Image: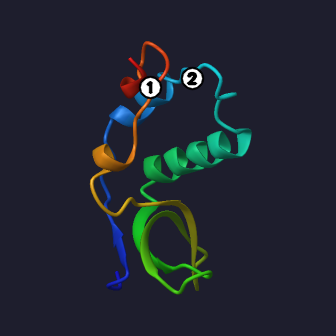
Amino acid sequence: MRGWIWKRELVNSWTHSITNMAKTVEGSGGLPKHHKNNFETILRAAANGDLALVQCRMKSTGEIVAAVAAVSWDGQHYTITPFALMIDGDPFELLDPPNPDGGFFEDK
């Protein structure tokens, strides 16, 4: 594949179990339906070997960013659909993940 795309053929088996860990954080209203739908699309693409890490350009700034994308082939052309941006930097410094027992870790 080209330099702007990296595709791994093997899919980790954890993807199924992680979808069953959903728990709404109090006061957050939960995840929007379109985020859940996009996540399901990512899981299907991963299961089919059609998930890739690609370079995209932000329309608003021109910055080159890494994104998780579904990739399909119609016999003549690739269709690349970016779904999620990769985080630049240490995600543990930038984000406070949800606590499986409710709320967020730094809330405790």
> Which residue is painted at 65% across and 23% down in the image?
27
Q: Height in image: 70 above or below 99? A: below
Q: Position of residue 2 (x, y in %)?
A: 35, 85
Disc nearer the start of the sequence (2/1): 2
Q: CA distance from mark 2 to mark 1?
A: 8 Å
Q: Position of residue 12 (x, y in %)?
A: 31, 42
At mark 2, the secondary structure is loop
Three-letter code for the amino acid on which mark 1 is drawn: Phe
Q: Mark 2 and 1 residues: CB-CB less than 8 Å, in contact?
A: yes
Q: Position of residue 99 (x, y in %)?
A: 41, 22
Foreground residue among 32 and 81 = 32
Foreground residue among 11 and 89 = 89
Quadrant occupied by the N terminus: bottom left
Whether residue 6 sits left or right of residue 54 in the image: it is left
Q: Which mark is residue 25?
A: 2
At mark 1, the secondary structure is loop
Q: Quadrant of residue 54?
A: bottom left
Q: Height in image: 52 above or below 103? A: below
Mark 1 lies on residue? 104
The residue carrying pointer 1 sits among few (fewer than 14), some (14 to 19) or many (20 or more) residues within 10 Å by Cα, namely: some
